[in-house]
Image: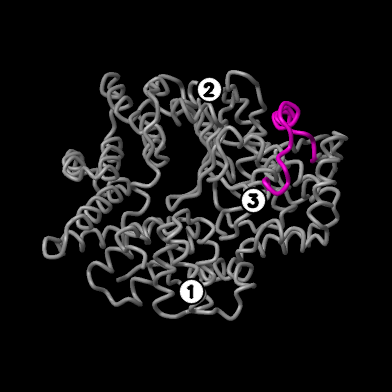
Amino acid sequence: MFSRMLAYLVVFSGSWLFTSDVMADNLAKDTWYEIDSANFQIITNGEPSSVRRLAEDLERYRAVALSLLGAKDDGAKLTIYAAADRESYAGLVGEDLSELTNGLFDTTAEGSYALVNLDGRTGERQLEAREFLFHEYTHFLSYNGTTTHYPYWYSEGFAEFMSTMTFGRGNTYDIGAIPGERAMTLLYTSPLPLKELLRATVYNTPDEEKGRVYASGWMLAHWIVMKSGKTEEFKQFVKDYNNGADPVKALSKNLGMSIDEIEKVYNEQFREGRFQLARGKVPATFKSERPKLKVLSGEETVVELARFLVKSGYNTHGIHELVEFAERENLYAPELTAVRADAATREGDFDQAARLLAQVAPSDRSNFWYQKAQAWLWLNREIGSMGGDRSNEALKGARDKFVKLVNNQSGEAMNWYGLAISMQMLGYPKKQYVEMLEQAYLRAPRELHIAQWMAQELYERKDADYFAEVAQPLMLELTDEAEYNQMKNMLAELKPKAVGQSITQGNASVKDKKNNTAAGGSSKATP
C-alpha cells in the first residue's frame, strides 16, 4: 500500500532544488510591477508598458484559445512571473535551469503559475516573449482542473503551434506559423524518428534532446490540426493513451493509417518546409480592457520574490540573500518572517520556523499568511512525532486554522488537504476527512500526493469507477515502478465497469462535483 506518511508530507519536500549560486538579492534592487487584468496577474521587472501590451494580447489570445479548444472558462486567474532578462530569470530558477529553459509552467496544490524570460536570451538566440507566454498559457488551459494527460510530444508541440498566434486588423488572428526556434532545431539536427517521438516522456528524454521533442512534436501537431482531417480521431487517441494504450499502436489505430504511412507524411512535411496558416476572428464576446498597473514597494517586492522561491522550490538559497538585502535596506516586512518560517517548515527545521513565527507581532497574526504558515508548522511537526508524543492540542489548533483558511480561501487545495490530514490524525470518521480530501482533489487533481491518497481511500471503499477515474491518470504521473505496478494491480482487482470511458467522464464529473458542492453550500468546512 502507498505510505500514508508520503501523503502527509505534501509538496514540502518533493520539488525543492538546490541550484548553482545566483544572487537573488540583485532581483530586489530592480523596480517590480504588478500588472492586473481580468484573467492574469503579471509580476515583472520588465518594461511596464511593453508587459502591459503583452497582458492585453494574452487576454485576446485567451478568448481565441478557449473557443478553439472548446474549453470551459472556470474563472481561474493565472499568475505569471515575467523576468526582464536572462540574469533576472536565473535569479528565480538558478543558473543551470536558466540555460535549459526560457519559460516554465507548474500546476500545484497552491495554484498554477507560469514563469517566462521576457528577453529570451540563452546566450545564442533572441526569441519572442509573447511566444513564451502563449506557450505557457496553452499548458494552463490544457491542464487546469483536469486529469487528462497528453503525450509529451503533443503537449509541447501543440503549445508551440498555438504560441505563434498573431493578431491583425479587424480583430482577426492568424495561426500556424513556424516557430523560429523550432525551425532552427529541425534544420541543425533532424526530426526525431516517429516511434521514438511518440514514446518520448519528460523522464526518458535527455535534456539535450528535449528541444527535438518540442520541434518534432510541433511538426506532427501542425499536421494533425491543420491538414490531417482527423482531429476527432485524434481525440480518441488521447482517450486511449490515458487508458494506458501503447501510443504507437493507438495512434495508428485511431488515425486509420500505418505508422509507416504517418511517418511518410511527417517526413514529407520536413522536406517541403511549407506549413499553411489559418485565419479567424476573435470571438465577438471579447471586450478589451486596459490592465491595471501598480508599482510594487520595496517591501512588497522582497516578499513577492521570496514567496515565489519558496513556492516553486527553485533557487531556494536565494531567500537568505533576499532577507539580508531587506534588513540592509530597511525593507523588512512581517510577512517576510512568515515566508521564512514556511521555508524552514519545508526544510524540516520546525524549531526555527517556530522561533520565526514567534517574532510576528500579535496584531499581525490574524492575517492569512500567518495563519497558513502556523497551521502547516503545527501539522508537520506532529506528523514528524510518533504515537504518544503527538500533541492533540497542536493538531486541534492546526485543524481550526485550516477551517478558517478553507472558509476564506476555498479555492486553494492545500487548505483542504491540510484539513483532511489534521482530521484524520485526530481520529475523525473516515467519511468526514475523506470529504475534505475530495475537495482538495477536485481543486488539484494533478497533485501527486493528493491523488495517491484519494486513490487509496477509493480503493479501500471499493468504489471501482471513481477509483479508475483517479487512478488511470495518476498512473501516467508515477515514475516509481513499484507504485505504478501496485496501482495497476489495484485497478485490475476492482475491475471498474467503464475503464475505457472513465477519463472523459471523469473530467466532467470532477467539475460537476466541485460545482455542485459550491452550489450546495457545503464548500464551507465545519468539522
Counting from the top left corner in percent of width and height, residue 457 is at: 39, 72
Label 1 residue SS: loop
Quickly name the residue at label 1: 520
Of 185 and 30, nearer the camera is 185
Q: Nearer the viewer, mark 2 or mark 1?
A: 2
Is residue 181 highlighted in magenta?
yes
The residue at 24%/50% (across/down) is 377
Q: Dot 2, how many residues are within 10 Å of its Cα: few (below 14), some (14-19), or many (20+)? A: many
Q: Quadrant of residue 132?
A: top right
- At label 3, the amino acid type is Arg
- At label 2, the amino acid type is Arg
Counting from the top left corner in percent of width and height, residue 253 is at: 77, 63
**Real-space Cα separation, disc 2 to disc 1, in angstroms:** 48 Å
Check if mark 2's residue and mark 3's residue have beta carbons within 8 Å: no
Label 2 residue SS: helix
In the picture, measured across the screen, residue 444 lies left or right of residue 224, that is: left
Comes first in the chain, label 2 or label 1: 2
In the displayed structure, 347 sits above or below 498; it is above
Of 359 and 511, nearer the camera is 511
Checking the image for residue 86, the label placed there is 2
Residue bounds of the magenta highlight: 175-197
**Real-space Cα separation, disc 1 to disc 3, in angstroms:** 43 Å
